[in-house]
Image: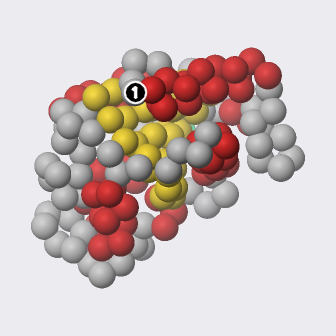
Amino acid sequence: MILIISGTNRPNSKTLKIAKCYQQLLDRKSVENDLFSLSDLPPNILETDLYGKRSPEFGPIQQKVSDADMFIFIAPEYNGSIPGALKLFIDCCSFPSSFYHKKVALVGLSSGRYGNLRGIDHLTGICHYLRMHVLPLKIFLPNVQNELNEDGELFKEDTMQFITEQIEEIVRF
Ligand SMILES: Cc1cc2nc3c(=O)[nH]c(=O)nc-3n(C[C@H](O)[C@H](O)[C@H](O)COP(=O)(O)O)c2cc1C
């Protein structure tokens, strides 16, 4: 099962829209998947789910993570890296069983011109620390505001081509 992680808790994020596009593409290929948005994290997660503590709200989220054998992390660029919420989420998950030796594909996006290139490098380092197998083909979506139509869907032909190529590699990975 592939778990898509929408890597920010910002309301109305473009990240979630991109994550939903990935989910549609996996659905079209009948690939078993689920989507978790960090906007659905428990609000007091700093107090309730770090350092071995576990709230009833995080239990089902941990279960989704435990059930996945591959992840797609969609990570927006916040101050030149991944959002703190994404690192916090990773830190809250059970270690090492949540991520060890599992597969992961990475997608970066930003309103600026780099598409979170540096943040995806940071995230690659974290994933390697967690002994994950990182798909070499990573997708970067700079100027993401120009990538989505009024319905919040990706519409550019060249972007769709790159993403479709990544989806095909994800399925083969
Ligand atoms: C706290 C914060 C920091 C940000 N830092 C950057 C940045 O360093 N570079 C950049 O290109 N965009 C930056 N942005 C803009 C995001 O790239 C933009 O919000 C984009 O739409 C993707 O994020 P979203 O999923 O929150 O919409 C930042 C946004 C926030 C909320």
> Is 43 placed left or right of 94 in the picture?
right
Mark 1 surroundings: few (<14), some (14-19) or many (≥20) residues within 10 A: few
Q: Residue at x 50, y 50 (%)?
A: 32
**Residue 151 versus residue 101 in the image, above or below:** below
In the rendering, at what x and y percent does residue 8 appear? 50, 51
Please name whichever residue, 149 or 13, is drawn nearer the observer in this view of the structure. 149
Residue type, mark 1 in image: Phe
Please name whichever residue, 69 or 16, is drawn nearer the observer in this view of the structure. 69
Name the image quarter holding residue 131: top left
Name the image quarter holding residue 65: bottom left
> Is 115 placed left or right of 54 in the picture?
right
Residue at the outermost front position:
30
> Is 89 placed left or right of 146 in the picture?
left
Q: Residue at x 36, y 66 (%)?
A: 61
Q: Residue at x 51, y 55 (%)?
A: 35
In the rendering, at what x and y percent does residue 74 appear? 50, 40
- Secondary structure beneath label 1: loop
Q: Residue 110, can we see it? A: yes
Q: Residue at x 60, y 33 (%)?
A: 110
Total residue callouts: 1
Please name whichever residue, 11 or 169, is drawn nearer the observer in this view of the structure. 169
Ligand 1 neighbours mark 1 (CB distance < 8 Å): no
Q: Which residue is mark 1?
A: 173
**Residue 93 versus residue 130 in the image, above or below:** below
Answer with the quadrant where ligand 1 appears in the image: top right
> Is 101 placed left or right of 76 in the picture?
left
Residue at the outermost right position:
150
Q: Quadrant of the C terminus?
A: top left
In the rendering, at what x and y percent does residue 100 appear? 19, 42
